[in-house]
Amino acid sequence: MTSQEPPLNLESLRLERGESELRYLRARRRRRLGLALIVPLVLGVALWWLFTGSLWGPQVQVAPVVKMYPAQAVTLLNASGYVVAQRKASVSSKSTGRLNYLGVEEGSRVKKGEIIGRLENEDLMAVRDRAAANLKAAQASLGQYEAELTDARLNFQRQKRLVAQDLVARQDFDSAEARYRIAQAAVANQQAGIRSAAAALDEAQTAVEYSLIRAPFDGVVLTKNAEVGEVVAPFGAAANARAAVATMADMSSLMVEADVAESNINLVSLGQPCEVILDALPGVRFPGRVHMIVPTADRTKATIMVKVAFDTLDPRILPEMSARVAFLSRPLGPDESQPRLAVSPRALFHKNGQTMAFVLIDNRVQAVPVTAGPALGDLVEVLGGLKEGDRVVLQPPAGLKDRDRVQVREL
């Protein structure tokens, strides 16, 4: 006999909802209701900003306010080159010997004829002193011969008068005349000996002078190429000998040698005003002029060398400095040496009789009054209202107002 199972009670399977579950359901319904209200509101605000242009604003182009030199507005051509001394020498000795004195170093300023070095020359000085002594001895002997000549001349004249009166024998007269001729020859011979001794002294002095190394002109020592104790020789002919003791340049002869393309040489003329900018001194501009157009071309580079002289030399200008040259259409005035603020004329507009410009600040524009000056090439000088680095709107669109938001369109 099988026992029957009791019938299934479905009510007993129902789970009772707790208080926490009820709170969760009520919070979820509130969030859904909030989202249903916020989303349309956000969409409406976004559409309103979009259609009124306040969200993005119109697209505009901007340009910076820059500083420029007046020379840039009258520049016909630019070229690059280097500062070169037109008078430059590698100073060497005139004879071979060991260097025992060197009185200069890099940067030393020397005068023409100043002794900057000396070779060992004790033997040469001894020869010079001997030649000087021989000259003095010859000059002293000349006095003796001249005294004998005077005596012989007086005796000859006396014998000549007496023989004319037949008071002396003819033989005595002939002896007086011969003695006089011999005295004349002795004096002439001694004078020749003096000249020979003087020439020997000059030769010895020249040999001593060859051992002295002198500056050929006023200038500055650029490099020192030898040291005391080294052997130096002209042209470095001797083995292991230095050919030059020092290299020097005349700083008053500095010019810029610039390479100008053959196709642009027609823009350059003698005496043309220029402005020189040195890479070592970018904030300084040096006025100059075209000194020479070298009458030959470099076929490898298709350029012609132009030498530009400085109107005023500056001690900061050094040989071999790299330089840029601006060839100008006219000379610059005394008030055109300083940079000036400039802006594109497309950024300026007139409103209520006043010149204005829109300055970009954090994607919004601010209308500012501008005091404009004369034209500087393609730009306009700014006398007031703007400062260097300001970004201004070019060709502001119609309807653009102060504090409007804009989009910057890249050029």
Image: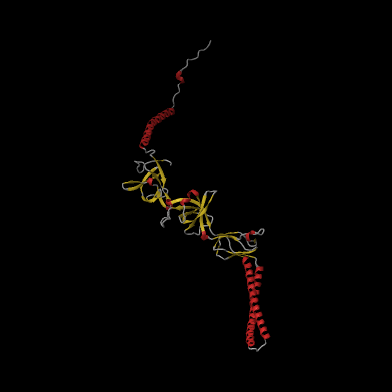
User: What is the x, y in percent for residue 397?
Assistant: 36, 41
Residue furthest out toward the top:
1
* Residue 88 visible to the viewer: yes
- In which image quadrant can residue 106 be found? bottom right
Q: Vertical placement of 190 versus 6: above or below?
A: below
Residue 119 falls left or right of residue 75: right
Name the one closer to the observer, 18 or 340: 340
User: What is the x, y in percent for residue 183?
Assistant: 65, 80
Name the one closer to the observer, 15 or 336: 336
User: What is the x, y in percent for residue 193?
Assistant: 65, 74
* Quadrant assignment for the C terminus: top left
* Residue 140 visible to the viewer: no
Name the one closer to the observer, 138 or 224: 138
Residue 394 falls left or right of residue 169: left
Report the residue at 65% width, 78% height from top.
Answer: 185
Residue furthest out toward the bottom:
167
Residue furthest out toward the left:
352
Count the marks.
0
Question: What colouring method underlies this structural image?
Answer: secondary structure
- In which image quadrant can residue 17 be found? top left
Q: Vertical placement of 26 versus 347: above or below?
A: above
Q: Vertical placement of 386 versus 216: above or below?
A: above
